[in-house]
Image (cartoon, rainbow, N blue to C red):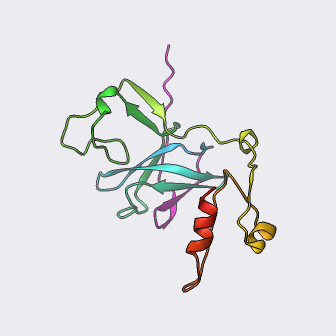
């Protein structure tokens, strides 16, 4: 037997700031939950929970916040963002939300995948090693470069920035 969870709607938006809305007095809401936002004119917008606390929930609205006012209803769906995937997607042009924008038919999903992915564990990453000697004493002593890391090189206008870059890119 499937249990159907009834979703509550809230009309407690206290503030709109750029792409964010602030919803007060909600029940406990999960981080990254998907949100449906129903505007008074019937338009439905989507969003995602960015921050949650006992008093307020911060929601990022994907389609912009124009038209959102005190009569706007917010419904928390209790699920993370998922993308419908299928082999039929190969060669298609999709919007950022996975909808076809190439004039072709809707994608019939074979399965839905969570797009959040696993968190990166910094301790599982291999430690950088293999010192890169640039021949520039201030870099070698104060900002040691190691193979496998990003190599930031900054230069001012008119300074010889190509020579150190060429020297370090050989490695």
The residue lying furthest to the top in this view is: 1
Quadrant placement of the C terminus: bottom right
Task: Please tell me which residue is depicted at 57% across the width and 53% down the height of the picture.
Answer: 50
The answer to whether 21 appears left or right of 96 in the picture is right
Task: Please tell me which residue is depicted at 54% across the width and 49% down the height of the picture.
Answer: 49
Q: Is residue 127 above or below residue 67?
A: above
The answer to whether 84 appears left or right of 59 in the picture is left
Which of the two residues, 14 or 119, is positioned nearer the viewer here? 119
**Snapshot quadrant of residue 169:** bottom right
Which of the two residues, 84 or 147, is positioned nearer the viewer here? 147
16 magenta-colored: yes
29 magenta-colored: no
Task: List x then y, in percent, for residue 151.
Answer: 64, 61
The residue lying furthest to the right in this view is: 141
Task: List x then y, in percent, for residue 32.
Answer: 56, 45
Task: Please tell me which residue is depicted at 59% across the width and 73% down the height of the picture.
Answer: 163
Task: Please tell me which residue is depicted at 67% across the width and 54% down the height of the picture.
Answer: 149
Q: Which contiguous range is marked in magenta? A: 1-27
For the image, the number of numbered tags is: 0
The residue lying furthest to the left in this view is: 103
Task: List x then y, in percent, for residue 77.
Answer: 48, 39
The residue lying furthest to the bottom in this view is: 158
Q: Is residue 2 above or below residue 162?
A: above
The answer to whether 36 appears left or right of 28 in the picture is left
Which of the two residues, 33 or 123, is positioned nearer the viewer here? 123
The answer to whether 104 appears left or right of 99 in the picture is left
């Amino acid at each position: 037997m499937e249990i159907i969870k009834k979703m509550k709607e809230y009309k407690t938006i206290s503030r709109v700031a750029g792409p964010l809305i602030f919803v007060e007095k909600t029940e406990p809401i999960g981080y990254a939950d998907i949100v449906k936002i129903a505007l008074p004119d019937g338009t439905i917008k989507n969003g995602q929970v960015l921050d949650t606390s006992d008093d307020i929930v911060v929601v990022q609205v994907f389609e912009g916040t124009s038209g959102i006012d005190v009569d706007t209803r917010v419904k928390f769906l209790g699920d993370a963002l998922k993308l419908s995937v299928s082999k039929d997607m190969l060669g298609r042009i999709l919007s950022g939300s996975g909808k076809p924008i190439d004039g072709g038919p809707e994608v019939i999903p074979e399965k839905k995948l969570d797009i959040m992915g696993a968190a990166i564990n910094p301790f599982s990453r291999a430690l950088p090693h293999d010192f890169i000697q640039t021949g520039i004493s201030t870099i070698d002593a104060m900002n040691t470069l190691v193979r496998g890391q990003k190599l930031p090189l900054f230069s001012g206008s008119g300074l010889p920035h190509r020579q150190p870059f060429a020297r370090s890119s050989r490695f």
